[in-house]
Amino acid sequence: MSETAALVLLASYLLAVVVCICWQAARCAPGPVVWALYSFQRLFCGWMYRWRANRRCPFPAEGSALIIANHTSPADPMQLWMNHHQNTAGRGVRTISFMMAREYYEKPVIGWICRKLRSVPLARNGRDMGAIRETLRLLSDGNLVGVFPEGRINLKGVGLLEGNPGVGWLALKARVPVYPVFLSGVPGGSDMVAPFLNRAHVRVSYGDPVDLSEFYGRATTPELLEEVTGILMRALGRQGGIECDGQTDPVIIPGPGLVRRTG
């Protein structure tokens, strides 16, 4: 083969790759920017975190779902978004709108990414009803929403912090499937940069959706919210090999500022 023919063949391969990339980006429903972000994070998680899961991601290809996970690192949302396309029709990309602390949402780069993913900024005082209404709207419109029910990063990296009953309230109001996902091996800490610079062996354990239909229509009392939250936290704990007895098991690490049952 002549040098000219070789160059033409190489250019044809490159053109085919470019056309394929453009086609994939154009058919991405949330837009080409989201497709580019997803493609980058898949490469990043696969190489940097050596990402592995117990099975194919079970998140629905269409319709809404609430995804709950333990929280030990600022990099946790990437682990939940990774490979969700494998269960979608045509392997299309969906966004996962995360409820997140407002101060991170307002940071320049992180905030821009979160806005593209339609994440919801939430005030830490737990009284941000505007954020709750927006989350319910996203779920009612058929979107995926991610929540970290511990309410903050578990800096110890072991066990589970006490679940905030707000996740139980959200699950009951939205009436959508709730998928527990346990993350392990994610580089932790409160620093927003270091977890993205450290290589790791991340393991993700997907659970089956939790059926809460027996609680629908009942009066939303503190006791009911505690019971439902306990069910969700136990389902989450089991994915990580943690057996929790409601909110009292010593494996659950209590944290300040969380809503507790009194009396």
Image: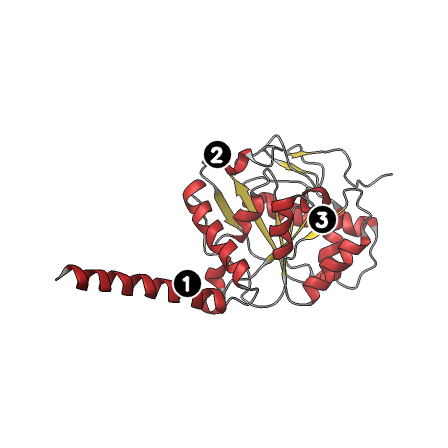
Image height of 213 relative to 55, above or below: below
The quarter in which the C terminus is drawn is top right
Q: Secondary structure at mark 1?
A: helix
Image height of 196 relative to 171, above or below: above
Quickly name the residue at label 2.
Answer: 198
The quarter in which the N terminus is drawn is bottom left
Residue, far front: 4
Residue 126's spot in the image, x, y percent? 79, 45
Residue occupying image coordinates x 80% and y 55%: 130
Tell me the kind of residue under disc 2. Answer: Asn
Instruction: Say whether marks 1 and 2 touch (CB < 8 Å).
Output: no
Residue, far left: 1
From the viewer's side, name the closer residue of 162 and 213: 162
Of the two numbered discs 3 and 2 on the same chain, state the one appearing first in sequence. Answer: 2
From the viewer's side, name the closer residue of 174 and 7: 7
From the viewer's side, name the closer residue of 109 and 132: 109
Of the two numbered discs 1 and 2 on the same chain, state the one appearing first in sequence. Answer: 1
Residue 34's spot in the image, x, y percent? 54, 58
Residue occupying image coordinates x 70% and y 45%: 106
Residue 121's spot in the image, x, y percent? 72, 50
Quickly name the residue at label 1.
Answer: 21
Separation (CA) of disc 1 from disc 2? 29 Å
Residue 160's spot in the image, x, y percent? 64, 38
Q: Residues within 10 Å of mark 1 (few under 14, many from 20)?
A: some
Residue 206 appears anywhere in the view: yes
Separation (CA) of disc 3 from disc 1? 43 Å
Quickly name the residue at label 3.
Answer: 229
Tell me the kind of residue under disc 3. Answer: Thr
Q: Which mark is residue 118?
A: none
